[in-house]
Image (cartoon, helix red, strand yellow):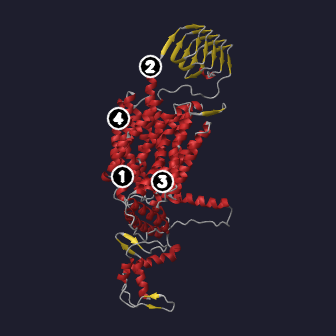
Amino acid sequence: QGGREANQVSDDYRYQDGSYEGYAPNDGYYRGGDEHAHEEDAQSDVTEGHDEDDEVYEGEYQGIPHPDDIKEKQKQRAPAVADEYRDRADLMAERMEDEEQLAHQYENIIEECGHGRFQWTLFFVLGLALMADGVEVFVVGFVLPSAEKDMCLSSSNKGMLGLIVYLGMMVGAVTLGGLADKLGRKKCLIISLSINSAFAFLSSFVQGYGFFLFCRLISGLGIGGSLPIVFAYFSEFLSREKRGEHLSWLCMFWMIGGIYASAMAWSIIPHYGWGFSMGTKYHFHSWRVFVLVCSLPCIASLVALKFMPESPRFLLEIGKHDEAWMILKQVHDTNMRAKGEPERVFTVSYIKTPKQVDEFIEIQSSTGTWYQRWLVRITTTFKQVWDNVLYCLTAQYRMNTLMLAVVWFTMALSYYGLIVWFPDMIRYLQEAAYESRVKIFDEEEVSHFTFNFTLENQIHRNGEYRNDKFIGMKFKQVRFEDSLFEECYFEDVTSSETFFENCTIISTVFYNTDLYEHKFINCRLINSTFLKEKEGCHLDFEEDNDFLIYLVSFLGSLSVLPGNIISALLMDKIGRIKMIGGSMLISAVCCFFLFFGNSESAMIGWQCLFCGASIAAWNALDVITVELYPTDKRATAFGILNGLCKFGAILGNSIFASFVGITKVVPILLASSALVGGGLLALRLPETREQVLM
């Protein structure tokens, strides 16, 4: 009997080819392998007998088991009895050892599964989610010119609407990224995409500014949470040799999202008639159709994600061995069938699972009320998420986290700041050119004349208008200064940037116009009447520069294509660190050339060059952030850093926009110095291209 137990010890746990194996699950699946050969080697040529219960047993002498096997068996049995009495530090040390063994074995398993149809299918599913993130960044900027008139937005309201999406993304990245390490990649990504698609869809129908702002905030929260999950999820199906390259290819979908948003804005928003109205209160204009169309990539990704499995690496981390094994077998079989080798057998029989330290206390259904049980579950989960956040700042990861935080922040401050600054500068140059073409009319006298056409970009000074009619006409950028209007009649008049300054208006009737009180500055109104003023805000004019703004965004998104291709091909050859440092330093040099951008074409060209140079740094940052942290902290760390990135975007948008039309020196120096500092600091980060996923 002693020999029989010793033989069992020697067979229970064995190390083969750098992978750790033990008991094969007794679930009816064929595991393959060479167990039979091991049994023949371990057994001696002795007789077999039967005990009273007709159970087979081996002979007295079975060979001497290896001492390491006996120690390993004793080590496995002892904690099963005494875990509750052991110090947590000992349990964590044992878990760390298990995780290291699992990391190397999992790398071997992924290599055996190969890279094929399964990974490419997941690539496109997660790419749609990343595309939705790219769309979300652009959608508010495209609808603002139309929404500001449709919802009567002030300058402060427009600024808040532009920043609220980034605020939602910041909160979503930290919250949902942390939950993904506790609840699972797939589950949290489905929650994230569901939130985004539901509130993005709803925002296209709401009429009030407050409700629209709230919908975009929650929509941003959802899509912000998807970004850290997407990269953590996809990386756990990739081998070390493929990880850097294919994560970089995945980043191309952010570019595709920008191109999609620009093309849809160009195709839909200028067609103001693409909509409907219900009475005088509810209007569904073309920009709302655009918002609706922009939610389609998120919805498509959400539907496709239903057919994808959970990350097996996450399942192993929480001790769900059998589920993880089944998914890995599915990956293997899918890829082998696609390669024309369906007869290839998945040879893995057992995968190392780390020791489970965290204990989730489940309240029985008979204990307390339903909301008390849910409160305990939610409180416990968020406590675990908070512990993960603090773990990223422990001694082991503190320096890496702080350096990455600085690099993420400086990159976001300069990139998002300039991305907003470029269109604003182009618009400023356009307005300056427009104002230079203004027509000035002095001391004109007009009487008994009917105006029924559009007046645009004009200044009328010291004029006199008597018994004139202004019917069914439009004023755009028109200013009347020190003029006299006597017994005139205004009917069905719409205006944009039109004002009356120091004018005298006598016995004049305004009927169904939008010439409100604030448009009369220091004017004297004598016996004048305002009847049936236009209600709400109206899209009176199509902006001539809308096409150029869409084109600028389109070219800016398209310009990152060469950078994406280069970074994908070189990521695993030159390494992540050189990619980040080199890209950021080249981008800083590009910033200095902005001093020579004194025309629209020059600004567009420098924007394309800057975006193309900086995209490699973004891709490498995504890859190194995934690789520097262990599986149970990966999405949390990515969420924290991406949340900090969105905070940098908020600051960049606010700071850079405030200098438009004032000076170019501050934005250019701020962006270039931030890129130089972040790029040099990035060179001190550890290289991870030869590292397995922990």
Q: Amino acid at mark 4?
A: Phe
* Up/down of 388 relative to 346, above or below: above
Disc 4 crowd rating (10 Å Cα; few below 14, some 14-19, many 20+) is: some
Kind of residue sitting beneath label 1: Glu
What is the quadrant of residue 151 in the picture? Answer: top right
Which residue in the protein does label 4 denote?
Answer: 592
CB within 8 Å, label 1 to label 4: no
Q: Which residue is mark 3?
A: 229
Tell me the residue at 58%/45% (across/down).
199
How many angstroms separate mark 4 from mark 2 (CA)?
Answer: 28 Å
Tell me the quarter of the image containing the N terminus.
Answer: bottom left
Up-down relation of residue 63 to residue 244 (above or below): below
Residue at 59% over, 58% down: 378
Residue found 49% across the figure and 34% down from its top: 267
Horizontal side, residue 125 vs residue 597: left or right:
right
Residue with the mark numbered 1: 245
Q: CA distance from mark 2 to mark 3?
A: 51 Å
Q: Is residue 252 above or below residue 503?
A: below
The residue lying toward the viewer, choosing from 16 and 159, is 16
